[in-house]
Structures are given as C-alpha cells and as structure tokens.
Amino acid sequence: MNTIMRKSVLSVAGLAFAGGVFAGPIAAHANPVDAKPVAAAVQSTAPKPQGEQSRITLNDEQTANVKAIIAATKKAGLPERAAVISIATSLQESKLENLGHLGDANDHDSLGLFQQRPSSGWGTPEQITDPAYSTTAFLKGLKQVDGWQDMPLTEAAQTVQVSAYPDAYAQWEQQATDLVGQYWNS
C-alpha cells in the first residue's frame, strides 16, 4: 500500500473512531423502544407571531366557519400555514362571522368572512357569503404571493386583502394557529 493511500485510510478510520467516541456515549443512552413521537408545531418554519395577540371565544357558527376554512384549504391542497393565515384574516375582517351587508356600518360593499367586495371582483354577493367559496377565493390570491409560506402572516394577508389596517392581522396569529391545531385532523 502506498503512503498516500495508507494516510487516507488511516484518516478515515481516525474520523470514524473519533465520531464513535463522541457519539457512542450519547447513543448508548438512547432507548428507541421508549421514544415517543413529538407533535410537530403548525408553524415549524413560519415566523413567530408578531406583537400582542388577541383572542375571542367562538360560538357554534364561528367554529363551523373555522372548519369550513380548514376544509377548503385541504381541498385546495394547501398546508396548515395557509389555513392559519386564512383564519387569522377572517378573525380580523369579520371575527369569523359570515357578514351580510351592514348598511351604513359596512365598508363599501364588503361581505362574508373575509369582507370581500363584489365590486372588486371577488365574486357575487351569494358567492362571497359562501364560506367555502370565499376561502377558496382568498387562497387563490394567497397562492399568487411569492414566498407567502415563510413571510410574516400580516404581510401575506395584507398582500391579498389590501386593508387600510395592514398590521392588524398579526394579532390573531396565535388563536388561528391554535384553531388549526385543534381542528386540522378532526
């Protein structure tokens, strides 16, 4: 065996030995039989919630709307992060209530869970007040936002919604995350 080859083999053997010396004691204490699965967080790669968080108690209608948003997100083939952004957006826009026309208290002709406007091309009043349709319309807009999966929730929501209060979505991120965690697999 020539000198270069011998040095290469010894170097590799030395690295393997050193790795075993350092990893061995750790590996020796690992007991795979007792290992328990660790629940993955909904936002494992997503940014942490920004700012103070708000929370409301949901009634049956609001809970049904959460489930409708999650179902539409799954049907669109999108991940949990899309449902978190959708639910947080709806919490800000309507408190998860499927709002009809509110007369003088209404913002222009905004309707439904996401306060979408027929005059802005979101759909007819009947479509916009259908939770599945309005969620699908929101998600269609979200998918057009480059990098939405990794950007702060409020930035993703604002890019779709174009709200007069762009930072307001952030306050609902923790509750939206909790709701998706609670209902995604149910």
Image (cartoon, helix red, strand yellow):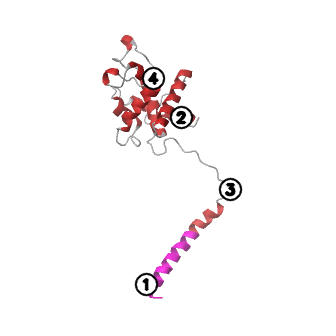
The crowd level at tag 1 (other Cα within 10 Å; few <14, some 14-19, many 20+) is: few
Query: Going from the N terminus, do you reach mark 2 or mark 3 first?
Result: 3
Residue plotted at (41% across, 34% down): 139
Q: Which residue is mark 2?
A: 178
Query: Going from the N terminus, do you reach mark 3 or mark 4 first?
Result: 3
Q: Which residue is mark 3?
A: 33
Q: Is residue 163 left or right of residue 37?
A: left
- How much space separates mark 3 and mark 4, taking CA atoms? 49 Å
- How much space separates mark 2 and mark 3, taking CA atoms? 31 Å
- Choose mark 2 or mark 4, whichever is in front: 4
Q: What amino acid is labelled 3 in the image? A: Val
* Figure check: 13 above or below 33: below
Query: Going from the N terminus, do you reach mark 2 or mark 4 first?
Result: 4
* Discs 2, 1 touching: Cβ within 8 Å: no
Range of the magenta residues? 1-20
The crowd level at tag 3 (other Cα within 10 Å; few <14, some 14-19, many 20+) is: few
Residue 186: where, in percent of width, then height? 59, 34
- Choose mark 1 or mark 4, whichever is in front: 4
* Figure check: 28 above or below 163: below
Say whether residue 68 is magenta: no
Secondary structure state at the residue bearing disc 4: loop
Say whether residue 5 is magenta: yes
Q: Which mark is residue 4?
A: 1
Query: Going from the N terminus, do you reach mark 1 or mark 4 first?
Result: 1
- How much space separates mark 1 and mark 3, taking CA atoms? 44 Å
The crowd level at tag 2 (other Cα within 10 Å; few <14, some 14-19, many 20+) is: some
Q: What amino acid is labelled 4 in the image? A: Asp
Q: Which mark is residue 130?
A: 4
* Figure check: 8 above or below 90: below
Q: Residue furthest right?
A: 33
- How much space separates mark 2 and mark 4, taking CA atoms? 24 Å
